[in-house]
């Protein structure tokens, strides 16, 4: 009876349990679906950036030029109208500067044109903390991975500025096998954790979307090093 019960249990298990090949196929399809969603998201991000750059920004530039011409024509007057035109031109220039920052945050044109090293170097130039950038890449990444690499480094440097109290920081990037390994370090106070609300968990989730990994070393007193490992190509790209 014991042997019969065990045999029936094994038979039922075989009937109900999915085959190993089926499980593997499901995992692969979920991975591909995740990558397709990431590609669609990045394509939409680039479309919004293009529309803002070629549409709203160009119209705003035309408005500033028109106001400048009107201001020049009224420069001999001291009327309220002349002052309002001058004020409107300055406000429009401020809006244009804000729009440029917004476009850069959505999807920087430099990333599209020249890739991760140039785009990250621009972020480092604008960073209040001195940053040394050394990223060596023999070829461009696929767009989905390239976007994740850029925004991961941007978020990491933002955290350095906000939380580390560092005097210097550094960014390196090298191809190791089939992976791109990026490292962001600083000489700050350390003590960072992925669950401390500094955006590291969200960053880890973004990296995981394309099959990457994130590791953090930040002992109290520093230094802090964030390591981002990304696949050189996504599963859909072979």
Image (spheres, rainbow, N blue to C red):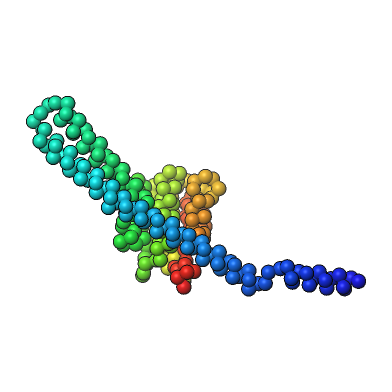
Q: Going 49% across and 56% down the picture, which residue do you hit?
A: 206
Q: Considering depth in this image, is 219 or 102 the residue closer to the camera?
A: 102
Describe residue 7's horizontal placement relative to residue 43 as left or right: right
Q: Looking at the rendering, in which quadrant would you find the N terminus? A: bottom right
Count every numbered label the image shows and give the total: 0
Residue 150 position by quadrant = bottom left
Residue 211 in picture, x, y percent from top left: 51, 63
Residue 158 in picture, x, y percent from top left: 41, 48
Q: Going 73% across and 68% down the picture, which residue do you hit?
A: 16
Name the outermost residue toward the right: 1
Residue 10 in picture, x, y percent from top left: 79, 71
Q: Considering depth in this image, is 87 or 177 the residue closer to the camera?
A: 87
Name the outermost residue toward the top: 79
- Is residue 58 placed above or below 83 in the rendered structure? below
Q: Going 41% across and 45% down the picture, which residue do you hit?
A: 161
Q: Going 31% across and 50% down the picture, which residue do you hit?
A: 52
Q: Considering depth in this image, is 108 or 169 the residue closer to the camera?
A: 108
Task: State whether residue 88 appears in this view.
Answer: yes
Residue 22 in picture, x, y percent from top left: 63, 71
- Is residue 87 placed above or below 188 in the rendered structure? above
Task: State whether residue 221 appears in this view.
Answer: no
Residue 176 position by quadrant = bottom left
Residue 29 position by quadrant = bottom right
């Amino acid at each position: 009876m014991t042997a019969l019960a065990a045999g029936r249990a094994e038979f039922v298990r075989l009937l109900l349990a999915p085959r190993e090949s089926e499980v593997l196929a499901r995992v692969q399809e979920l991975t591909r679906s995740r990558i397709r969603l990431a590609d669609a998201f990045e394509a939409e991000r680039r479309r919004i950036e293009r529309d803002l750059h070629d549409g709203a920004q160009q119209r705003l530039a035309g408005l500033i030029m028109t106001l400048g011409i009107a201001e020049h024509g009224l420069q001999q007057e001291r009327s309220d109208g002349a002052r309002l035109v001058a004020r409107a031109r300055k406000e429009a220039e401020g809006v244009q500067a804000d729009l440029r920052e917004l476009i850069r945050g959505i999807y920087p044109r430099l990333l599209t044109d020249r890739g991760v090293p140039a785009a990250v170097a621009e972020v480092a130039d604008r960073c209040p903390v001195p940053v040394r950038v050394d990223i060596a890449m023999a070829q461009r990444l696929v767009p989905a991975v390239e976007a994740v690499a850029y925004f991961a480094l941007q978020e990491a440097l933002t955290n350095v500025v906000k939380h580390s109290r560092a005097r210097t920081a550094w960014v390196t990037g090298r191809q190791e096998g089939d992976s791109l390994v990026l490292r962001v370090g600083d000489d700050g106070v350390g003590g960072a954790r992925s669950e401390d609300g500094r955006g590291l968990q969200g960053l880890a989730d973004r990296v995981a979307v394309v099959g990457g990994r994130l590791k953090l070393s930040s002992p109290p007193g520093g230094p802090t090093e964030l390591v981002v490992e990304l696949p050189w190509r996504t599963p859909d790209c072979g």
